[in-house]
Amino acid sequence: MMKIMKSSQIHSETPIEASSAVPRRSRLQEFWRLLKGNSLAFVGLIIFVLFFCAALAGLILTSGTKPVFDPAMVRLQEKLLPPLSSPNLETLRPEEIPKLGVYLFGTDDLGRDVFARMLQGAWVSLTVGFVAVGIAVLIGIFMGGISGYFGQGHIRVDQILAAFVLLLGGGLLAVGAIFSGSALLLIGSAYIFFSRWLKKGLGKQPPPKWMKVFFAGVISIDTLIMRLVDIMLCFPSFFLILTVVALLPASMYNIMIVIGLTSWMGATRFVRAEFLSLREQDFVTAARALGVSNWRIIFRHMIPNAIAPVLVSATIGIATAILTEAGLSFLGFGVPPPHATWGNILSDGKRFIFDAPWLTFVPGFAILLVVLSFNLFGEGLRDILNPKLKERY
Amino acid sequence: MTIRKILIFTPILVIFFLLQSYFWVPTYEEQSRGNPERLNEYIAASIGDASILNPILSADSASSDINSKVFEGLIDRDEELRFRGRLARSWDIHEEAFFYVNEKANIPGVGKVGAKKVVELLKRAKAGDLPASDEVRASLDNIREISIIPAREFLVTRHEKKTETDQEDIEVRIRVMAPNRIKLVLSSVDQDVFQSLSSILGKDYFSSFNGGDYLHVDQELGEKKSAAYAREILPSTEHNPIVVFKLRPDVKFHDGHIFDANDVKFTFEAIMNPKNLSPRVADYEPVKEVQAVDPLTVRIVYKRLYSPALGTWSMGILPEHLLNDETLRDEANRVGKDPEKFSIRQSSFNRHPIGCGPFVFRQWKSDQYITLNGFDDYWEGLPNYKKFIYRIVPDLLTQEMEFYAGTIDSYNVQPHQVQRLKNDPGYQCFSGPSFGYTYIGYNMRREPFNDPIVRRALGMAIDVNKIIDYVLHGQGESITGPFVKVTDYYNHRIKPLPYDPQGALKLLEEAGWRRNKEGWLEKNGKRFQFTLITNSGNDLRKAILAIAQDAWRQIGIDVRTDLLEWAVFIQERVDKADFDALILGWFMGIEPDLYQIWHSSQTNPYQLNFVGFKNPQADDLIIKIRQEYDHDRQVAYCHQLHKIIAEEQPYTFLYVTKWTAILDKRIVIKETDEKGNVVYKKITPTKTGSYTFYFNKWIKLPEVPSFALDG
Amino acid sequence: MLSFIGRSIIQKIITLFFVSVVSFLIIHLAPGKPSQVDPLNPKFTPEMVERFRKEFHLDKPLYIQYIYFYRNLFTGKTVSWKDNQSALKKIWERFLNSLPLFIVGTILTWTLSFPIGIRSAIFRGGFYDRSSTFFSYLLISIPGFFFAYILIIFVVNSFHVPVIGMETFGIGDPSWPRWLMDRVWHLLLPSVLGATGGIAILSRYVRSQMLEVESQDYVRTARAKGVPEEQVLYKHALRNALLPFVTMFGLILPGLIGGSVIIESIFSWPGMGRMAYEAILARDYPIILTVNFISAVLVLAGTFVSDVLYMVVDPRIRL
């Protein structure tokens, strides 16, 4: 929700809006009107809000030492009960009786309450989705921003050399050659200080001829970052995630980070494209003429205007991340217990698909519903934020 | 508009074409009725593919499944788990024992004497001239022959590292002037023979023998090194068990070549050849030499007493004529590889194996299937099934679906599925205890697990029967010790720990643990807190993890849990003994050798006694079990060891799972009786629980036979 | 044009080099070791583990291992650690298995998404458009394995025919049309499952392209001239809307190798994805790295082809 609110505020600041002469309606109201017009997106938003509330409730109700719904409570004698069946009160200790009085979604093969597990899983799935996409979006904005704004700048030979020396030094240190490694590190950092001093000292004076080779630009920053994107795109993404997750120790954080680190390329491209066009626009030129610093231009003026496509891709990205996590769980590399996620409830339950179909269908349809709502909402958002399509609705 | 029509009709055509293919596919019934050949094929499903079809190199279960059908060993085990001859018709075990004459030792009543006198003395004792206890008597009666090996001189060269870090070798020459040695031929293996003899020759006769006196080393070695060499080159006493196999004549390999003693010798040498990197080296390391006495006799001499050795000869025998150095060199040249580095491991034989087992290898499509055909010249007769197909289906649920669709005859059926299918008239179900057990192991180096009372209390807090009933769906049995439950070695007199949380609390109170205000157990202000770990990817262990955590929390123990990926779990935690408690399972062989898992010398990092179990009595028994060739005595030792381990509770022994299997009821045993009539019988598991024991006689009938209909 | 091709090839080669370094580092620096050097197997003594390490060059420094590996790869000598088979041969076999799945999936995707996408663009905002939007997203959102199981169980329980694997097992020696149809049947479910996501995404894309083109002046002009609506749509609009899809032909190339791990393991389809997955599980480094390398080559070749195609097709672009 936070994100949507923010985007609407941001758009109220855009200069284009300020110059429009149509009867004034605030951007938020406009947004709301468009959203209501797109019923699928609206339904998506509602499910999304419900899911968000469920996840929050799940966090509150299932954590702590004495949770209201204990997702880890094992009641073996109550295993594989169908949804809405009531517990056998005689065999249970008082603290084992489910708080709702019935097993809303049934119990699993260990007699754990599927409802409690789904509640807990909602929060975990949501976190995985948001954190992973958050990481991806942050990296994407950073890389895309640099590439779009400073892209024309060239990296000089000496900078590459210095970076190479530093990298080599770090590598040697890691391998174990402490002496040569630290020597290289020292040389590298010494050179950086030296060149800074040189820049200040020489001022506008041209450097001596023999040094020109070192100061020749080799590769533009833009090319460098785009090649980096190409490198990342060379790995089939699910396969890459699978490799890394399989090789790393299983943990929720690893999965979030890995999904995040392997899906920033789209955002980078969007932001770069937006920045390239925004940079040429009048309000940026004006800001620059006023002497506003580069970083202020980027953060205050450009990012807010470039955020729309990123937001759309982020919404859909969250959906994808939840699906990816479910896929990983299916292969046995998902978020490890004690965290329940919808993915691992589903993949645990599939063994019992004939004996206890609800173990498969409840999480399966929950994932379907939530991912669908994210996707529909993202689609609606795209339509709403797309100025070209606006007049048609 | 043509474009529009194309756009609409192409997808319709494509979909129509795809859907109509349904009418060409056979249903379950059609597969057996419409295609009689299908009845002669047996299709087994497996989760994983085989990796290498060579019995001396394979280490995974899928490969061994195939290898056991293609290759045949000298012996195997019958319905009662006794050895029975396969390629060997019969075998005989006896022993040659040696000791050096210790001229410096005082023999009671005789004094310091030479070899001849010692032999004389022993002969007198054997004849009954000397008083002797019953055990000594038995040992003496067992001696068949006593002879002298005269003193001799020889040279030994060894390579030694100068210092610990030095790479360079130095040559050590040792001149050995071995004294007279006495050789005893025993009719059966007797690990106590020297103990018995020392009652005649004097208590210290063997232990006071110092081999170092007879060695001359040309280099300056440390005290320790010299003593080690002396023990190695001139051991005071030596047991050499000998196994002689009489081989079955006229057994053929699948390519028609006749099997003989040289193949056995070759198989042994191939295992020991370091170039081949065989994972079975450890099993055959105690073998001193394998002699092909004649084409049908193999004599195997062992370096020391090692009772599990006989069982190792159930390993499949390789054809020497296809894998000897010459053929390998030819193959290397053919495929353009360096003949020096080319070993059996690189040979194409591993994908096209030839053995003398009941099935002939046909085809292997990686990750799809392996096909075997019945072997016409099999010495025990052609198996009933003409074809055996090993099909790889990596997902359990899809295996089940394929079983229902009729394209698999057996699959890895899960306990809960057995419960559902038990009453289905179309299927027959089997189950029986397996050879593996699951346990919770405690790191006995750490507080508070160093206290047996605490370990016992932890075990008592877990309701094992509940786990068996609910998690295993009844397909399991509780277990109290480390031996395989279906063997004699398992001590059935030991009662499993009772499920008694209150009793557990009482025991913990004895050990100083009391509940604090919040309900957690505390001792000296420290909360009872630890982490229970296991590997991911095993649903049973995951369930136990949750159950144990819950059960212990009930009695006030704060347990964290962690699931780790297998490689990380083993390398970071188990190997480095960096854990509090873990859930794991051992898959046991039938042999009762527990040295690697329970002996106190195996507690270092990377060894298998990672819980750190140390008990001198147990150590002694483990060694004795290892050296005892007599079944009854071995059983007695095992029962004692079992009792000690059950008292110490280094593990909480949880359960043995039962294997489960399910077959179409149309699959039966087909035999021909003496009169030549064909007899059909229902498949029943043997006493030890192997339902595939008579696999070679199985066949699938077109209809369910009447005797199988009831029950 | 030529200079563009040359420059782009050089750039791709440099990228490929970095990809090879990165993938090599990821795999070798991650914890865990190949199963052959797993010391917990009681059958493996420490000496044997050491010998295996030597055999696999694991005892050498990383950069030497890197050189060894790529030297072997380019001379075609790479062998799998698991079964000592030539990696390239293994991959080729699997590739041939994946190919029919890929082809049928692609045909389904491309033949179905165009009519669906075009139709929903024509009836924009109508019931058809909305329901196709909804179903597209439904298909994107459903977890693949969940969908697969539901389909398999449905088919097996109601029709009693096998669906797993590449062909019906134990069918004997059928006549060739029967053999062919049997294989086609086994292709049906996995390729439909593999195509669902593609159909959904591509049809959405077709729709938005059509909408984009519809508002262009030349379409308006055509309408104003009185050209029949059908001709406007299928001749003027569609042709231009199709332009970007030509370039996508280049980008489907990598799909050949990525395959779908999940679909292939559920259907026990011995394809590339499953081989890669099993190689990861067994830590069979040579196979993982070779697959990775080949897929990187395909991705780069795909983008290259699509760039060139774009230049050829779209007269506005001249580099």
Image (cartoon, coloured by chain):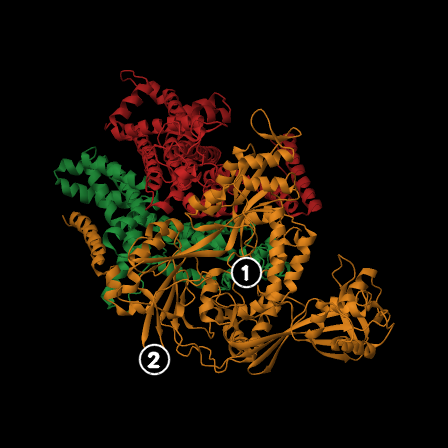
The colour with which the image depicts chain A is: red
Given residues B385 and B226, the one toward you in this image is B385
The colour with which the image depicts chain C is: green
Quadrant of the image for the C terminus of chain B? bottom left
Q: Residues within 10 Å of mark 1 (few under 14, many from 20)?
A: some
Query: Which numbered disc covers residue B658?
Result: none
Q: Which residue is mark 1?
A: B488
**Regarding mark 1 in the picture, which secondary structure is present there?**
loop
Given residues B480 and B334, the one toward you in this image is B480
Q: CA distance from mark 2 to mark 1?
A: 38 Å
Q: Which residue is mark 2?
A: B675
Residue A342: x and y, percent? 39, 37
Q: Image height check: is A167 above or below A102? A: below
Q: Residues within 10 Å of mark 2 (few under 14, many from 20)?
A: few
Given residues A309 and A193, the one toward you in this image is A309
Task: Give the image quarter of residue B635.
Answer: bottom right
Task: Give the image quarter of residue C233.
Answer: top left
Is B624 on the left-hand or right-hand side of A318? right
The colour with which the image depicts chain B is: orange
